[in-house]
Amino acid sequence: MSGLSRDPGGWLEAVLGDAEIRARLGEAAQIADMLRIEAAHAQALGAVGRIAPDLADEAAQAILAAQIDREALARAAAVDGVPVPGLVRQLQAALPERLHPALHGGMTSQDVMDSALMLALGDVTAIFESRLERLQAVLGQLEARFGDRPLMGRTRMQAALPVGVGHRIAGWARPLDHHRAELDRVSRRVLRLQLGGPVGTGDSLGPQAGEISAQMAQGLGLAAPDHAWHTDRAALVAYGAWAAGLSGHLGKIGLDIALMAQQGVDELRLAGGGRSSSMAHKHNPVRAEALVSLGRYSATQLAALHLALGQEQERSGTAWALEWLSLPPLLEAAGAGLSRALGLVEDIEEMGAR
Amino acid sequence: MSGLSRDPGGWLEAVLGDAEIRARLGEAAQIADMLRIEAAHAQALGAVGRIAPDLADEAAQAILAAQIDREALARAAAVDGVPVPGLVRQLQAALPERLHPALHGGMTSQDVMDSALMLALGDVTAIFESRLERLQAVLGQLEARFGDRPLMGRTRMQAALPVGVGHRIAGWARPLDHHRAELDRVSRRVLRLQLGGPVGTGDSLGPQAGEISAQMAQGLGLAAPDHAWHTDRAALVAYGAWAAGLSGHLGKIGLDIALMAQQGVDELRLAGGGRSSSMAHKHNPVRAEALVSLGRYSATQLAALHLALGQEQERSGTAWALEWLSLPPLLEAAGAGLSRALGLVEDIEEMGAR
Amino acid sequence: MSGLSRDPGGWLEAVLGDAEIRARLGEAAQIADMLRIEAAHAQALGAVGRIAPDLADEAAQAILAAQIDREALARAAAVDGVPVPGLVRQLQAALPERLHPALHGGMTSQDVMDSALMLALGDVTAIFESRLERLQAVLGQLEARFGDRPLMGRTRMQAALPVGVGHRIAGWARPLDHHRAELDRVSRRVLRLQLGGPVGTGDSLGPQAGEISAQMAQGLGLAAPDHAWHTDRAALVAYGAWAAGLSGHLGKIGLDIALMAQQGVDELRLAGGGRSSSMAHKHNPVRAEALVSLGRYSATQLAALHLALGQEQERSGTAWALEWLSLPPLLEAAGAGLSRALGLVEDIEEMGAR
Amino acid sequence: MSGLSRDPGGWLEAVLGDAEIRARLGEAAQIADMLRIEAAHAQALGAVGRIAPDLADEAAQAILAAQIDREALARAAAVDGVPVPGLVRQLQAALPERLHPALHGGMTSQDVMDSALMLALGDVTAIFESRLERLQAVLGQLEARFGDRPLMGRTRMQAALPVGVGHRIAGWARPLDHHRAELDRVSRRVLRLQLGGPVGTGDSLGPQAGEISAQMAQGLGLAAPDHAWHTDRAALVAYGAWAAGLSGHLGKIGLDIALMAQQGVDELRLAGGGRSSSMAHKHNPVRAEALVSLGRYSATQLAALHLALGQEQERSGTAWALEWLSLPPLLEAAGAGLSRALGLVEDIEEMGAR
């Protein structure tokens, strides 16, 4: 999916990536999502009477059942810059000609790809929500176990005044309330259909454009947009910024834990820990370190995503591609961070002074 | 203030900076804001009965009237890493000893600096709000003048299908509604007092910490926080991301205009334009270019600001300093972009085909 | 490998990635490279007399022939944070115990991984060199075909003065001489063995550390370092900056071509071009756009790589991981850019006015 | 100059900026440098016989003595996007008409500004060189004082094996050799005249363009370029990357020191240290923290500078402006880091165990 998981299932993914998020955003899932968009479009055309309802249903079934040749898709995309023209050609070849009126008509590549992304983003949101809830729970347990113990507060890397373990944990847990509320907000805002046709006016969909949009949105569980957002990427970028913000906060937790686990400081003890190939006594706080790395990495990926705001005219090939390169890593980093944070907090055996 | 305005009042500020925003965030304004925080703190101590109300008033007046030696402040900050210890020492020297109980007690440097930043951010928000409103108005006028004219829609830098000038303008104007609504939201969330004492527990303020906080917040026109946010920078970072998002969108407007003004394309004509030192016939679309530059610049500054989320323990000197370096340029870029966009749109003499 | 090629062989890789570079840096190749390092280490121990030469040869053969279970490797890396401890355990299990003295002794994980990366980087350098040479050749042919034609020079997106097509092409070609020379320089500097043991002192290798290093380096075709560079990443970061610089320059070429191919400007015509799913007449300059995206993307990835310079103490888990996340995408982007630029320049059918 | 020194001479500059570098790159110095370029150009015209030598000398003297109205310059730059057209108009008004043939003819704004930047960069290079030499010296003294003491080596934030203080110091000092050598190389490459006229062909300078260039370069102590580098910014970007690389390494030193100075670790004791406004016992390692902040900040500014490589056609207003915004902060950060590192190392009172 990203720099995080160079090879699906490989060691780097195990250390820094997230197989579940990667798979949900990967090509196989994306193709399935794009087929769902084409199928919903066919059914919407039937619902508004542009094609016969039976034909629409039949087309939708055939689209969802189509076997897509991924190598051919890649070859076509190398020419076209996007996978949709090749996908539509494969569907045209797979479906009998009488079903072709149900295919893609009035949509543009970006309608299909952006809407497909929204389906993925809906599922990713649910994964994040679930993990955030669990992380809050394990932090609650940590507070229950160690919250009353003394801890030296440290500011600017220097001993300051005693604070108690609970104060440190509150600094980890409280912002998660905010991040959960924000996730709800940013996901509500972004999760809507994209449907504007070649230049975003909806003209290609004819006078029933609004009805088609409403039908498709309902069928897909997305909001219906009041206009195409081909070049208005603010909501998508805000979702990415949410992910980077969460990863940054998880990085704070990781950094605190790595600092507390230092010999000499000894404010925290972890079960397990990374083994060294040369020093048998080492127990490296590798998940804490991963959180720090993922937080910093995400800050830089967000710069790439923000560059995608410079969408010239009615569609920018250059800016859109920057989203493809930066949003998935931001999402995977957030998912990976949540998993690592869960395991890391659960591994805390001692915290503070007894 | 930033890379944008290397020399206050200089040519680079005139091209890419914003003197008004720069001044509001500059050192003189910051010192005045910090004095306001100290004065509000003194009055709050009086209001809750920790010191005599008369003494509190007298101290507040003396604090606000204090003449701060900026060179001495800089020399002290070079040692301390922050200006507050030096500021407090200057105040101690300026105020009679009987007023010293009203000075700073229970606060930490970050309480003063963060709260002072909130005062500045409140004013900056008002400037943004006003300019956004004006920009929407001039775009409305542009739509009234040229909206009905034909325009070739362009996707991926290639002629696509006719769209009309109004469609292009809508792509500029509509996201501004969103950015205004978001500004209201992010500013409401961030504009709150900071008051936590040395390690963020509020213990140094004693049992009346909550009352002191409420009094100070009321006096300063800020919200009262339910806890210190010394290490929880999400709201501040979200404000910066808002600014970067706006600048990115203004960059889209600038890029569109620069592309439309090309010879051969000739879809837009600007009054004025930048003169060349060597080619008398040139009319460079310099404000359009500035919008593009500011949008891209802001994407990279946001990476620096996000790195500030990695706040270890109870206060991070390293991460906090990254905010000082990146938030003001993000704000100045947004302000500069709004000014440039206003002038640029007003300069449009022709748009679309007649 | 990266954001560039989310799914090996998928459509996104076809559009923006580079299968050859991705494969050379991928996990399978990396494991093979790490085995080569372990084998060279075994042979060096034999050469310096630490183990019997026959045993060394036998161990080296067995290491190179070992079948590594990648799933087990990933599981172990999830605990250890690096793949080497798990790899060594697999080798211990695969090799008879009498060969164990030839295994890994005195090395640390970073010795193996960094040295393995150097083997990959050597091959990637050769790929870059070859493509740069070909790109210079096709630009030479382009100059021969169209260099004498007139072209309007454009500055700040406005017509300036006539320059001739040859001047524009020279602005594309000349910097490539520099980038080739720089590639030679930065690769010579970086391509050296890593061998320092657990804390970089080489003590774990005993008094023959220097000889072992020299033997290993010779066997692997790398330079022998005079000290471990565990925390001194300047040469590696410089290689990444070279790649980002090349990608930035290729982005200039892509941007020029996309601008020249605009309707109305009509200074360049491409064969082929990307098809639209909704507009049969479109021929989108998708490879030109890809170059622009890759150039901008690389600028942001370089920020992540530079953050890897902050290597605390004798080894930083956090900073090292940032390299894993950012260097491969930088290399793949440069490789992808070279491929796209080659195809793009070859597709130019007309350039300038006749 | 930058985010580093929002207000010249202010407290933020004292903490994170560098007044000397800021001043050398500031507007007053830049205007003086631009006048030097115009004067050298006048004298070159005299030397090659385009104007009478006496006239050339007189013009050069008059140019260097001209009083530039900075407010008027800023007002003109707001229109033109660059200060040179306004500067030339001020010179035309200041010089008698008979000297006008010696003024600017054949140059373009970028020739003047880029060449002026080279004069500044030459001086900045000398400052860096001098500070690097001093930093190496103080590290040598540190090694002499404490190099033999024991120190626990730490990897991945965990105690590893003993290394000795000298090993840690070597990890700080050795890369500085490299950075000095690199500074010599990158500065030699970049420090050359810019002279290409409006579109970079040199045609506006007539058949003597080469002679004029050679004369100007010699007079200014710069190399003579064999072609204009208006859009070829690789050498400039490489200089910025050098600065970011140095700052990243200084960040490693700062991070090590901050970690060593922690209570509980106690491997290093600093004289002085930052005072707290609320905790009298605190001695914050503020210069160590500044080094960390400057290193991370520089990584992000380098992304902005790399975006400047995307220079479309014969001159990009948008990309060029990104250099103005990002190169000065990178240089100031490097200079600030060197100063802070010098003071910080000198302040080390104890290091390692006795």
Image: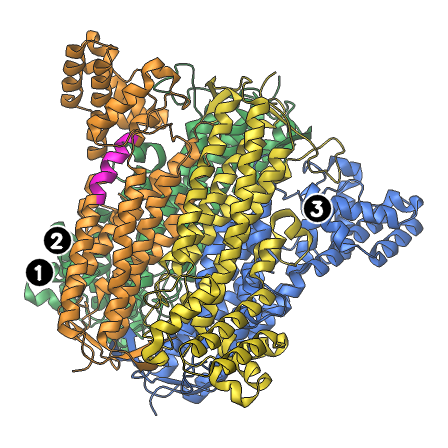
Chain colours: A orange, B yellow, C green, D blue
Same subunit, tags 3 and 2: no
Q: Where is residue B163 in the image (x, y as percent from the top left)?
A: 48, 19
Q: Which chain letter goes with mark 2?
A: C
Q: Which chain letter goes with mark 3?
A: D
Q: Quadrant of residue A99?
A: top left
Q: Quadrant of residue C273?
A: top left
- Amino acid type of the residue tagged 3 in the rendering: Ala
- In the depicted view, which residue is nearer to us: A99 or D61? A99
For mark 1, give the secondary structure.
Answer: loop
Q: In this view, does C31 lie to the left or right of B209?
A: left
- Amino acid type of the residue tagged 2 in the rendering: Ala
The residue positioned 37% from the left and 79% from the top of the image is B205
Q: Where is residue C126 in the image (x, y as percent from the top left)?
A: 38, 45
Would you name the residue on which mark 1 appears? Answer: C95
Would you name the residue on which mark 3 appears? Answer: D77
Q: Is residue D262 above or below residue C239?
A: below
Q: Is residue B66 left or right of residue A86?
A: right
